[in-house]
Image (cartoon, rainbow, N blue to C red):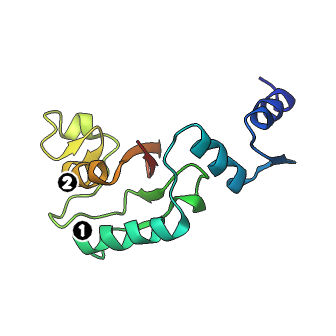
Amino acid sequence: MNKRELTAALQRLGIKVVGEKISVASLRKALAAAGAKTFTKKEQEDLIKDLRAKFGSKFKVKPGHEWSPGAVLWSGEEAEMPDGNYAFNYNSWESDPQEKIWQIGVHKDLVKWSDSKGLFWEPNDPGTYLAYPI
């Protein structure tokens, strides 16, 4: 699909495209119309406060809109859990094949918290993880 075809497809979905930029507001509106859960900046900030209250100040996390319009939160390999392990381990299949600490690269305690908030984490690259609505 070339750039023009992609732009036309996005516009058919009601997503405003100007040059190479997508309107976040129109993307959120299209996602909501499709039944997807979206989070406001305030909700993202509240999730960050809750994460830090539960997992401590060493858990580095930022609002997802800073990285990707569809992401709720973003974090990376520097995020540390209270047990001293990192929140994310891209190569956990090698270091933790029994999934005692990480489940598909995400710390098991963070998976539980995320499930309770309607989120799942996905690697963008080995050092960056993005949380999206379920």
Label 1 neighbour load within 10 Å: few <14, some 14-19, many 20+: many
Q: Would residue 48 be seen by someone viewing this image from the given angle?
A: yes
Alpha carbon separation for disc pair 1 and 2: 9 Å
- Which residue is rendered at x = 52% and y = 39% of the image? 35
Q: Would residue 20 be seen by someone viewing this image from the given angle?
A: no
69 lies left or right of 46: right
Measured as percent of width and height from the top left, residue 54 is found at 23, 69
Q: Name the residue type under label 1.
A: Phe
38 above or below 49? above
- Which residue is rendered at x = 42% and y = 42% of the image? 122
Quadrant the C terminus occupies: top left
Along the viewing direction, whichever of 12 and 73 lies nearer the viewer = 12
Which residue in the structure is indicated by mark 1? Answer: 55
Q: Quick one: SS at disc 2?
A: helix
Measured as percent of width and height from the top left, residue 43 is found at 46, 66
Along the viewing direction, whichever of 55 and 95 lies nearer the viewer = 55
52 lies left or right of 33: left
Along the viewing direction, whichever of 69 and 30 lies nearer the viewer = 30
Furthest residue toward top: 1
Label 2 neighbour load within 10 Å: few <14, some 14-19, many 20+: some
Which residue in the structure is indicated by mark 2? Answer: 109
Measured as percent of width and height from the top left, residue 72 is found at 49, 56
- Which residue is rendered at x = 77% and y = 30% of the image? 9
118 above or below 6? below
- Which residue is rendered at x = 79% and y = 46% of the image? 16
Measured as percent of width and height from the top left, residue 12 is found at 78, 32
117 lies left or right of 100: right
4 above or below 91? above
Where residue 46 sits, quadrant-wise, is bottom left
Find out whether the residues at labels 1 and 2 contact each other: C-beta distance under 8 Å: yes
Mark positioned earlier in the residue sequence (1 or 2): 1
Q: Quick one: SS at disc 1?
A: helix
